[in-house]
Amino acid sequence: MRRYWQVAEAVLDYRARFMEALDRDGIDVSLSPACSLPAFTHGASRDLITAGGYAILYNVLGYPAGVVPFTRVRADEAVGRAPSRDMVEQVALKVEQGSAGLPVGVQVVARPWREYVALAVMGAIEREARTQSDYPQTRVTP
């Protein structure tokens, strides 16, 4: 139980330092990839846990975040990784090779208790993205 409280204290300390950095730099909203790769092929996620690091950070911080579709992977972007003997790199290469046409999302993160800011920015991004020919329309998109 002692270790639990040590980790909890470290998380609280990290949250405070992160907020200080946002205050110092005047940052209210952060945009980032939702994931370091396009949508995974079935079964690939077990070998690509760290690809979700962009989302994991804000889960630890407890910040409101959401992902909005923005574009699609173009055919000329689908493979940009050199062959490797590393297992994770090999799985990532397979994911990238089959990614042409898959949607690419943008993660929007706001400060704590500012969900309305994240939602407003997501709405603005989506309104602009919908004007692009490669916007990833789906049947559930109104």
Image: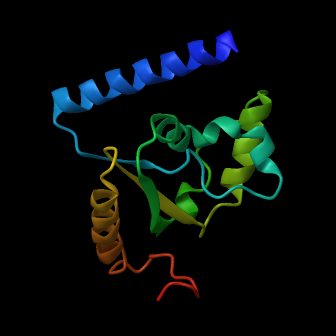
Closest to the observer: 13 or 42?
Answer: 13
Q: Position of residue 7 (x, y in %)?
A: 58, 17
Q: Which x, y percent locates residue 118?
A: 33, 58
Specify how the rendered protein is coloured: rainbow
Q: Is residue 82 visible?
A: no
Identify which residue is drawn at 65% across, 58% down: 39
Q: In this view, does 116 lie above or below 8?
A: below
Quadrant assignment, res 70 = bottom left
- The location of residue 107, given as percent across then percent down, is 43, 53
Q: Is residue 108 left or right of residue 4?
A: left
Farthest-out residue, right: 43
Q: Is residue 61 left or right of residue 31?
A: right
Residue in the image at 50% along x and 84% along y: 141
Name the foreground residue: 34 vs 104: 34
Q: Can residue 59 be seen in this view?
A: yes
Relative height, residue 22 to residue 139 (above, below): above
| Residue at left offset 32%, top offset 71% | 123
**Where residue 52 appears, x then y in whole percent?**
60, 43
Q: Is residue 134 left or right of residue 121?
A: right
Determine the residue positioned at 59% across, 70% down. 101
Question: Against 126, is 60 above or below?
Answer: above
Of residues 10 and 89, which is closer to you in this image?
A: 10
